[in-house]
Image (spheres, helix red, strand yellow):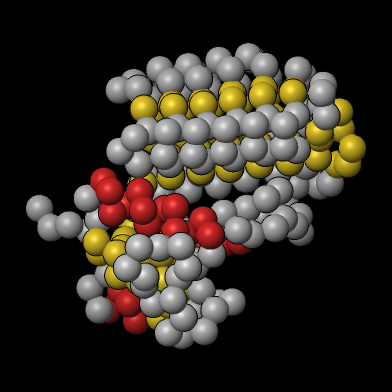
Amino acid sequence: MNTPLVIFLGAGGHAASVVDAVRLSGVGDVYGFLDACAQSGDRLEGLSGGLNVIGDDCLLPDVRAKGVTHFAVSVGSVGYAPVRKRLFELAVECGLLPFTVVHPSAMVSPSAVIHPGAQVLAGAVVGAGAVVGGNAIVNSGAIVEHRCVVGAHAHVASGACLAGQVLVGEASFVGARAVIRQGVEIGAGCTIGMGSVVTRSFADGVTAFGVPAREVRREVFGDNLEGELV
């Protein structure tokens, strides 16, 4: 079976972590990066050996014609960021397959379900019966305990902990070192602040933070919501 040739969409800090995971796992070959905010020929910082930015997202059909079979969205997010979702859908429309990234140091239960395009990074734990949606991120050292569900395009940031049977909705963001109590449901397009302790459920589009976390803002969930890319 041929090793997948992967194009990475985004050349920021998160990209270096994702590419490291791919190289260490040995299950994919890195073709290069497309990034609308970088210049062609730029080198990705923080990556051993370096890799060039080829161009922007308009080149997706071209790289497919050159033998690239898979893609990985390598922009992260702080807060809800629709860019990850849009890039994922664009690459699928171009005929590329989502590439799933699991760092070799991550601990993933055999009964967990990791959907295509998801990323489980260094030292993360995904427990028994948990589900990680397509294009979602379980970042370095994060814990997604038994029977949790992380929705498509969501991001559980570094060191965050989801206790058992937590639901994180589509495209939501759980900040670094946040803790979510068992059984809590976080709606779609939510932002949970760094270090927060979440003891109750929140509806779609809510921004909440604190100990315990309290709602500070609510917006209608959709592509108008904004976040910061990393």
Count of all numbered marks drawn on residues in the image: 0
Please name whichever residue, 17 or 56, is drawn nearer the observer in this view of the structure.
17
Position of 60 with respect to 188 (left or right) is left
Q: Residue at x 66, y 24 (%)?
A: 179
Residue 61: image location, x then y, percent: 37, 78
Res 214 quadrant in image: top right
User: Which image quarter is the C terminus in?
Assistant: bottom right
Please name whichever residue, 78 or 94, is drawn nearer the observer in this view of the structure.
78
Residue 122: image location, x then y, percent: 41, 39
Is residue 98 something that shows in the picture? Answer: no
In this rendering, the answer to whether 188 lies above or below 97 is above
Which residue lies most toward the bottom here?
A: 40
Residue 108: image location, x then y, percent: 36, 27
Res 115 quadrant in image: top left
Residue 191: image location, x then y, percent: 73, 41
Which residue lies most toward the left here?
A: 1
In this rendering, the answer to whether 42 lies above or below 200 is below
Q: Residue at x 77, y 19 (%)?
A: 200
Position of 198 with respect to 167 (left or right) is right
Q: Residue at x 75, y 38 (%)?
A: 193
Is residue 179 something that shows in the picture? Answer: yes
In this rendering, the answer to whether 46 lies above or below 222 is below
Position of 147 with respect to 47 (left or right) is right
Please name whichever residue, 47 or 163, is drawn nearer the observer in this view of the structure.
47
Q: Residue at x 43, y 20 (%)?
A: 127
Which residue lies most toward the right here?
A: 216
